[in-house]
Image (cartoon, grey):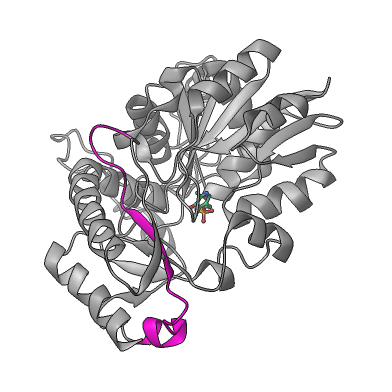
Amino acid sequence: MTETNFNTKTVHFQTKEPARNASKAKPIYQTSAFVFTDLDDMESFYEGEKEYLYSRYSNPNTDDLGKGIALLEEAEDGVATSSGMSAILAGILAVAGQGDHVIASDDLYGGTYQLFAQELLNFGIEVSFISFENLDAVTSSIKEKTKLIYTESVTNPLLRVENLEEVMKIAKEHGIKTMIDNTFATPYLLQPCKLGVDLVVHSATKYIGGHSDVTAGVLVGTQELINVAKSKVITLGCNLSPFEAWLACRGLKTLSVRMERQSRNAQALADALSSHEGVARVYYPKFVSEKGNGAMVSIDLAEHVNVETFFRSLGWVKIAPTLAGVETTVSYPLRTSHRTIPETLRNELGIGKQLVRISVGIEDQKDIIKAFMKAIEKA
Ligand SMILES: *Cc1c(COP(=O)(O)O)cnc(C)c1O
């Protein structure tokens, strides 16, 4: 480099990739592309000997996230994407296209509902929204062009636990693929691929990241479907950035300890709230796993409790339109996640004006319970 001039030095000052000990923490491959020594070396990528060419195709950090979640879900392979939403889209497009039909639960995350009800039509994919509480209705809505059954393992915000064995039975009988959003349960509590589910999707923005500092998604499943999904991610350009993938991977390392503590805190909060006269109903799932039942608790405040005052009286518990961080937060589904759901469907589902969704964090159990008791008393 010494023989070059100033402008060249400015660009090429960095030392070569050193032959040093591997770093303990995974480096961030914050690069848009990878370099080659000569044309034969470049050819080796296309022959499958070299793994990386261009970061939109694949990158060591995004691979860590996709393959890491595949490992935990006991799936064959996985791909990381820019968000939970794009992971859902990539999964759908891996299975269905123009003229195909999808059966989806009518009890879905608001964004997913919007994607299915509005955008999939532009791809020529028709979606029927069915209440999965009556699985006979699912069977009777199957058409010749039905390619996929889609639902969430634990639903949002009413935390209904889907009977995945029964859903799988119907799908298998009719040769239809299945895709499950496992965001609320996480692979710590539930691994739908073990039941034969073809695709599992996560908003890694939630428990996988766990610190509310990253937006990311992951899709895992059979090799055949993930191969198709990967090509969709590449062409649609909904790949995840290396740094975001690195953050999600860092969060993932503590998934077990977070989920264990958060589930325990949530159970205690659900128990405490269910005996309070200011709470009309507590939604907290049972039997998600022998390890726990998750960290989300929803409640219907009693009619005499003023919702506005309740939200204003929570002290250190913040209002946030997300979930799954290490901090306890609350949200109001009616005006956030379920705002876009038609009112009649919302009423049918039971998402009313007294409904509060609580994402329970890792704080001290007694402090969490105290904060909610105080807010209900005040309201
Ligand atoms: C948040 C969420 C999504 C969407 O994920 P993003 O990362 O925000 O795109 C999908 N499904 C469920 C259940 C979610 O909670």
Q: Residue at 55% of width from left, 73% of height from top?
A: 353
Bounds of the magenta segment: 289-312
Q: Is residue 359 left or right of residue 233?
A: left
Residue at (66, 34) in percent of width and height: 92
Compared across the picture, whether 113 is left or right of 35 comes to right
State left or right for residue 129 relative to residue 240: right
Observer-nearest of 217 and 168: 168
Question: x, y (%) of residue 369?
Answer: 20, 68
User: Percent from the top left, x then y, of residue 21?
Assistant: 13, 34
Look at the image and say whether residue 253 sits in the magenta stretch.
no
Q: Position of residue 261 (x, y in %)?
A: 18, 50
Residue 77 lies in what quarter of the image? Answer: top left
**Residue in the image at 69% along x and 50% along y:** 115
Is residue 4 left or right of 377 when viewed as pictured? right
Q: Position of residue 250 (x, y in %)?
A: 26, 47
Residue 364 in sight in this render: no
Say if 101 sits above or below 210 in the image: above
Residue located 18% across and 74% down the image: 370
* Residue 116 can be seen, yes or no: yes
In the depicted structure, whether residue 377 falls above or below residue 110: below
- As rendered, which of 46 and 197 lies closer to the eye? 197
Residue 302: in magenta span: yes
Say which of 171 and 287 sits in front.
287
Q: How many marks?
A: 0
Q: Quadrant of residue 348?
A: bottom right
Quarter of the image with the C terminus is bottom left
Quarter of the rendering containing residue 20: top left
Residue closer to the observer: 224 or 297: 297
